[in-house]
Image (tube, helix red, strand yellow):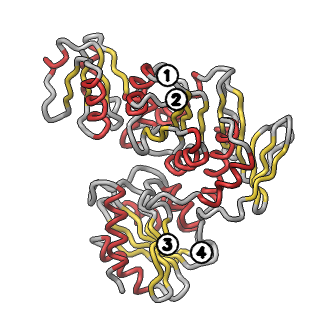
Amino acid sequence: MILIYGKGKTGKALSNYMSSSSIPHIIRDDEDFQEKDLDQVNTVVISPGIPFYHKIYRLSRKRGIEVIGDIEYAYRLYRGCLIAVTGTDGKSTTTHIIGQLLKEKNPFVGGNYGEPFINAVKENKKLSVLELSSFQIYSTKTFRPNTAVLLNVAVDHLDWHKRKSHYYLSKYKIFKRLEKHNTAVLNFDQEIIRNLKTRAKKYYFSVERLPSNYEGIYFCGNSLILKTYRNINRIDISDFKLKGLHNIQNLMASVMTAYISGVPIWEIERKIPRIKPLPFRIQYVKTIGGVEFYNDSKSTTVQSVVKAVESFPDKNVFLILGGIYKGGDFSVLKEFENLKGVFIIGRDKRVIKNMIKEKNIYLCDSLDTAVKEAYKRAEMGDVVLFSPGCSSFDMFKNYMERGEKFNKIVESLE
């Protein structure tokens, strides 16, 4: 008997699969779980948001019951090629781009982004591209993708992991399991990632020219240079539509992964102009009175806010942020001379204000107020940027509802 813990999208997908496969199971969450539910159980499959210190871990271990996550459970059943994407920021965008570049191979695209991985098993997919959060990686035991991508690492989710070292170890876990016939795509520009120990074949991506003894891809003007020991290819990206250097990094990781997966250079180059940003990732909304509005509601870390502001180096920016603080140092925002006003919302607005201090800071009771106050102070040619850098759950169901609310407020300004 299997106990599924969590009744969200992932838990329901697991239950649907088990029901259709006649696998005995029960599904519980914090509302209806009782310890006696474990009496006939030999495996507990947890949803991604269940932290390692939750009572279900302790009670299961006491009885000798294995606890695994949904990714591990699906992996044990999956028969196909796997690409896994992880990192602090950029996971969803990179997963999305890889999926677009591999479209002719009809991949399953999901995990933390999109559909739960178990659906790939149900659909008998032969290629899957998975976004993996640190939560999901933590609850794996044997999971080993064919290709693993590590975009970046910064402190995040300390509300879940409690310690910085625990977060880092969760991210590195899958790379320790990789074998020589597997592939790792790594960020050369972060020393901690560049020096990552893994048995896998390594390829790197960088915003600067790669040293001659490294294989990978780097940014050069309006091009990417993809180099291996066998050949060098230049890829034109002058028509790439996503804003910001961070999206160039996401693109490089995606292109390298697609190339490793057998997509020819000419096909990659043809597809790059067609790549569109995901909703709420520095998404242009509209221009009102000469003021441009951008929606980056997916932003939940300090690093993602920094990258969003960096996307507008030649414009004055009025930034709206806030929500549930997850860790990180917002004082880095003081370094941006073009940041003319910061409007902070949400539960932890005073915590964030105390970090930034020197900027023109306005505490707002609602997103509606923040948008209107930012617009009132902005002038023609300026940017109003919504990049919260925090979780949304104090005011909204999720980042999508938060993003939709911002768009509606902007539409109401005219």
Q: Are marks 2 and 1 in contact (CB under 8 Å)?
A: yes
Whole-Å distance between the Cαs marked 4 and 1? 52 Å
Amino acid bearing label 4: Glu
Residue type beneath disc 3: Glu
Total labels drawn? 4
Q: Nearer the viewer, residue 341 or 356?
A: 341
Q: CA distance from mark 2 to mark 1?
A: 7 Å
Write down the residue under mark 4: 337
Q: Residues within 10 Å of mark 2 (few under 14, many from 20)?
A: some
Whichever of callouts 4 and 2 sits on the residue coming sooner in the sequence is 2
Residue 79: image tag:
1
Q: Quadrant of residue 413?
A: bottom left
Q: Viewer-proximal residue, 238 or 400?
A: 238
| Cα distance between the residues tagged 3 and 1 | 55 Å
Residue 162: x and y in percent read 39, 37
For the residues labelled 4 and 2, say whether their Cβ atoms are less than 8 Å apart. no
- Mark 2 residue element: loop
Categorize mark 4 by other alpha carbons within 10 Å: few (<14), some (14-19), many (20+): few
Label 4 SS: loop
Side (left or right) of 216 relative to 30: right
What residue is disc 2 on? 126
Q: Position of residue 357 (x, y in %)?
A: 46, 69
Q: What is the CA distance from the residue labelled 4 to the residue labelled 2?
A: 49 Å
Tell me if I can see residue 208 in this picture: no
User: Which callout, 3 or 1, points at the residue further toward the start of the chain?
Assistant: 1
Q: Nearer the viewer, mark 4 or mark 1?
A: 1
**Which numbered tag is attached to residue 116?**
none
